[in-house]
Image (cartoon, rainbow, N blue to C red):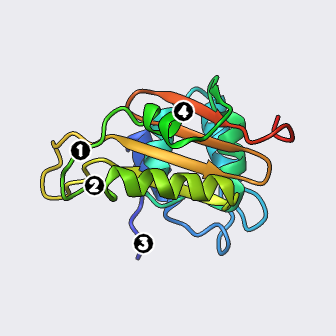
Amino acid sequence: MENKINLNSPFRTVILKILSYDPQETSLFGRNEHNDVFFQDLVTIGVDFYELLELFISSDAITKHSAAFIIESAPTAEILNEPTEKELRRIIPHWTGSKYHTAPIDAVLCELQQRIKECETGAYVYNSNKNSSNKRAYNDIYVLIVADNSTFFFDINRRKAYKIQQGADDK
């Protein structure tokens, strides 16, 4: 028997329960195999964008369809016209030397440049110190979302969004 949710359960628990279902198998709350507006709907009713993005990341719930709606829901973003290594390093102000980071900062910057240049559709998460044995360790979380027509970079801890433009075609 599946665990039931009590009506007094925290809202976060309800969201996590919904995210635990595969949208390609079960259609719930605007999440199905062709569409995923759940993130956008939650932002519309007042859920904090950055808290929600972190929750979706931790639940591995960003789909191709939800990525487009995450970008549509993004707060005002600073425009980044040239994704040079120097500019990308500027928008990643803190990166630890910890063994728990995603990779050394030089490798992360190189990967970011490649994904942006090649327009590799997807959502990519970069952790400066994801120490699972010490939950209190400070971790900066950065997210790159490359969708069909837009590329955004989010600094979750500093609550900043960057729209990355390449050439005159990007608006």
**Image coordinates for residue 11, horizontal then vertical, percent:** 44, 40
Residue 45 against residue 112 in the figure, above or below: above
Q: Amino acid at mark 4?
A: Phe
Sooner in the amino-acid sequence: mark 2 or mark 3: 3
Disc 2 vs disc 3: which is toward the camera?
A: 2
Please give the residue where the numbered disc 4 appears in the rendered image: 49
Contact, mark 2 vs mark 1 (Cβ under 8 Å):
yes
Please give the residue where the numbered disc 1 appears in the rendered image: 96
Residue drawn at (20%, 58%), measured in percent from left and top?
Answer: 132
Q: Amino acid at mark 3?
A: Glu
Please give the residue where the numbered disc 2 appears in the rendered image: 101
Q: CA distance from mark 2 to mark 4?
A: 24 Å
Q: CA distance from mark 2 to mark 3?
A: 36 Å
Q: CA distance from mark 1 to mark 3?
A: 41 Å
In front here: 102 or 2?
A: 102
Q: CA distance from mark 2 to mark 1?
A: 7 Å
Contact, mark 1 vs mark 4 (Cβ under 8 Å):
no
Residue drawn at (48%, 34%), measured in percent from left and top?
Answer: 50
Please give the residue where the numbered disc 3 appears in the rendered image: 2
**Local SS, label 2:** loop
Mark linked to residue 147: none
- Label 2 environment density (alpha carbons within 10 Å; few <14, some 14–19, many ≥20): many
Residue 32 against residue 8 in the figure, above or below: below
In front here: 168 or 139?
A: 168
**Image coordinates for residue 111, horizontal then vertical, percent:** 50, 58
**Image coordinates for residue 55, horizontal then vertical, percent:** 44, 47
Q: CA distance from mark 3 to mark 4?
A: 30 Å
